[in-house]
């Protein structure tokens, strides 16, 4: 119980202090997720004040915390994007997701296979866990005064939309090697029918239906003066929980369902409603984001990182340099919002690894018992959090001075 109260006080103090200094932090190399993660490392592995293993199944706790954080973040992105952005830029997003995401998976898997003494299946699981662009960390890069003042909207909105969608679409790449481990004979049929059709397609349909019905219901309730201000402000948060919970109960990709729900809901509301719903969702996003990074900092497997030795460093450098940048530069002629070279370079660099990698590594751990995927994913996530976090503000300011 003491550990829980320490963690509760720590999370509250962190959100309070970082929230009060958010404008200042947005102009420095210290991103809020990086500060929260560092705090978790200090009170956990360094000082030993909190031991998550004493809470029970700490990996399951981390998986569900990551899923909840992703859901809240994706709803925030859906409300932050221009209303028709996903539809108006469908071609560019399709190229990034249908071609870019698989290439990033294969590049990362190949690097894992080359640097580590592991089999192909393990390498594919590592690559799948870290291939999606993280919406939580990318939100800290593309929001705030520095980003909005210096970075073009076409860069920020496209990166946010990609990060939101590919979090859900990474699931098929994670599940394929898992199914190959469980039953190679039936893996392909299960992958096509259960994963692609049920988990992905049904998630999209579920999200579209939930968002549409919620938006219509909200407009009807306002027209009949059935809703008051407090109820209005929690609508999207409640909708996030509904999509996450119902999507999971139905066995679909609940993360993808949340984003589609947000996009469908956003088509039905606008003006004052859109502004106020977006504000409350961003506030809730901050409340959920920072504690999960503290939790990750508490649980990082330091000793297992050291066991990797120099090959771990080589894998980290290889993934940071090659996982995304060459792919985006290759595809930029087919991505109009990122076609200009300076914008393509930024888009290729700022594809952070974060909470999504934690969630999928925990999924792999639960399904296969393979802890090496968590070791690699946590190492790559930490490296990305540091490198992309400290370069975000300087790169944005440089772009603003040079091309703004």
Image (cartoon, helix red, strand yellow):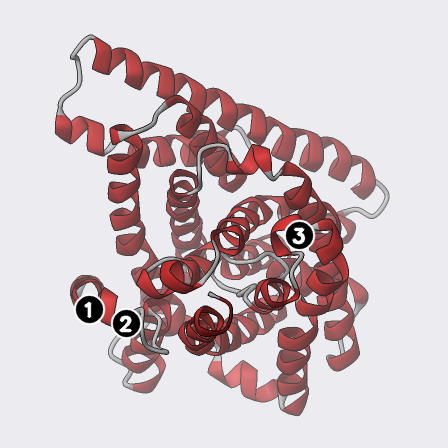
Q: Check residue 25 in the rendering and tell me which mark sits there, or answer none.
A: 2
The one nearer the camera, 297 or 342, is: 342
The image quadrant that residue 196 belongs to is top right
Contact, mark 2 vs mark 1 (Cβ under 8 Å)? yes
Q: Farthest top residue?
A: 224
Q: Which residue is mark 3?
A: 174
**Disc 2 from disc 1: Cα separation:** 6 Å
Dot 1 corresponds to which residue?
21
- Quadrant of image for the N terminus: bottom left
Secondary element at tag 3: helix
Q: Position of residue 52 (x, y in %)?
A: 34, 68
Instruction: Measure the C-alpha gap from mark 3 to mark 1.
Output: 38 Å
Q: Residue furthest right?
A: 185
Q: Say whether residue 380 is left or right of residue 286.
A: right
Residue at image location 66% in from the left, 49% down from the top: 336
- Determine crowd level at label 3: few under 14, some 14-19, many 20+ residues with C-alpha closer than 10 A: many
Task: Name the foreground residue: 302 vs 112.
Answer: 112
């Amino acid at each position: 119980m003491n550990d829980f109260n320490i963690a509760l006080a720590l999370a509250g103090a962190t959100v309070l202090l970082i929230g009060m200094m958010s404008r200042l932090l947005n102009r420095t190399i210290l991103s809020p997720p990086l500060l929260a993660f560092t705090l978790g490392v200090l009170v956990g592995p360094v000082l030993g004040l909190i031991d998550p293993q004493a809470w029970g199944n700490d990996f399951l706790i981390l998986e569900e915390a990551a899923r909840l954080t992703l859901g809240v973040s994706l709803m925030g992105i859906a409300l932050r994007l221009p209303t028709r952005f996903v539809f108006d830029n469908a071609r560019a997003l399709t190229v990034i997701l249908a071609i870019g995401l698989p290439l990033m998976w294969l590049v990362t898997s190949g690097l894992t296979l080359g640097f580590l003494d592991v089999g192909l299946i393990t390498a594919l699981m590592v690559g799948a866990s870290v291939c999606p662009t993280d919406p939580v960390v990318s939100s800290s890069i593309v929001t705030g005064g520095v980003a909005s003042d210096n970075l073009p909207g076409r860069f920020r909105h496209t990166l946010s939309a990609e990060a939101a969608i590919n979090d859900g679409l990474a699931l098929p790449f994670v599940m394929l090697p898992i199914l190959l481990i469980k039953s190679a004979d039936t893996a392909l049929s299960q992958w096509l029918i259960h994963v692609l059709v049920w988990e992905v397609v049904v998630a999209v349909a579920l999200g579209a239906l939930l968002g549409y019905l919620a938006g219509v219901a909200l407009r009807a309730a306002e027209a009949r003066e059935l809703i008051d201000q407090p109820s209005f402000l929690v609508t999207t948060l409640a909708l996030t929980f509904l999509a996450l919970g119902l999507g999971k109960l139905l066995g679909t990709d609940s993360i993808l369902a949340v984003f589609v729900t947000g996009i469908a809901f956003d088509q039905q509301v606008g003006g004052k409603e859109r502004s106020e719903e977006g504000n409350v969702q961003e506030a809730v996003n901050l409340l959920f984001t920072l504690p999960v990074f503290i939790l990750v900092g508490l649980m990082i497997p330091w000793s297992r990182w050291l066991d990797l030795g120099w090959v771990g460093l080589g894998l980290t450098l290889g993934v940071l340099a090659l996982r995304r940048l060459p792919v985006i530069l290759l595809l930029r002629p087919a991505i109009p919002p990122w076609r200009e070279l300076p914008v393509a370079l930024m888009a290729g660099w700022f594809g952070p690894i974060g909470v999504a990698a934690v969630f999928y590594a925990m999924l792999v751990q639960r399904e296969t018992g393979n802890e090496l995927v968590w070791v690699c994913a946590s190492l790559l996530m930490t490296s990305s959090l540091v490198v992309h976090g400290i370069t975000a503000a300087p790169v944005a300011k440089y772009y603003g001075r040079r091309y703004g």
